[in-house]
Image (cartoon, helix red, strand yellow):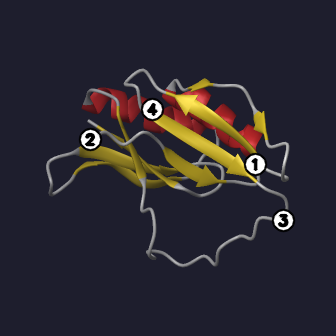
Amino acid sequence: MVIEHVAIWTTRLEALTEFYERFFAARAGPLHRSARRPFESRFLSFASGARLELMRVPDLPTPPAAAPSVGLAHVAFSVGSPAAVDRLTEALRTAGHVVQGEPRRTGDGYYESVVLDPDGNVVEIAA
């Protein structure tokens, strides 16, 4: 069995699309607008075959800022090497994105950093 895609609700569809295209080499598909209700979405595809769906509806409520909480914890991208983790982390920092966790070796054997996407979703960059 394979996970087909993971979806993220957002109020800033364009900002998230640009973030994942620019820093994670996503290829954005066409914008889908529902003919029946006020809903828009866009699939982002990655070289591995993984897909991320970004979805928007009007007046989407913002969840209270409490972490950790029940739900999706993070999305992790493997970039191949510790040097690539360091480079991408620094590129994100330079572009003004929040680096929540500096590059480090974790107890479960990953070399990773943790950044926040424009909506504050946690993204791990791993090797």
Give the distance between the C-alpha atoms of the residues marked 4 and 2, in whole angstroms: 30 Å
Give the distance between the C-alpha atoms of the residues marked 3 and 4, in whole angstroms: 33 Å
Q: Residues within 10 Å of mark 4 (few under 14, many from 20)?
A: some
Callout 3–callout 2 Cβ contact below 8 Å: no
Front tag of 1 and 4: 1
Mark 3 or mark 1, which is nearer the start of the sequence?
Answer: 1
Give the distance between the C-alpha atoms of the residues marked 1 and 2, in whole angstroms: 31 Å
Q: Secondary structure at mark 4?
A: helix
Q: Which mark is residue 1?
A: 2
Callout 1–callout 4 Cβ contact below 8 Å: no
Residue at figure coordinates x 57%, y 34% from the top left: 20
Residue 46 drawn at (x, y percent) = 47, 26
Q: Left or right: where does residue 18 sit relative to residue 67?
A: right
Residue type (three-letter) at the residue carrying disc 2:
Met
For the N terminus, give its image quadrant: top left
Front tag of 3 and 2: 2
Give the distance between the C-alpha atoms of the residues marked 1 and 3, in whole angstroms: 12 Å
Residue type (three-letter) at the residue carrying disc 1:
Arg
Mark 2 or mark 3, which is nearer the start of the sequence?
Answer: 2
Q: Which sits in the foreground, 33 or 35?
A: 35
Q: Which sits in the foreground, 27 or 23?
A: 27
Residue placed under numbered mark 1 in the picture: 12
Which residue lies most toward the front here? 36
Residue placed under numbered mark 3 in the picture: 59
Residue at figure coordinates x 42%, y 39% from the top left: 4
Residue 49 drawn at (x, y percent) = 40, 26
Residue 37 drawn at (x, y percent) = 84, 53
Front tag of 1 and 2: 2
Callout 3–callout 4 Cβ contact below 8 Å: no
Residue placed under numbered mark 4 in the picture: 88
Mark 4 or mark 1, which is nearer the start of the sequence?
Answer: 1
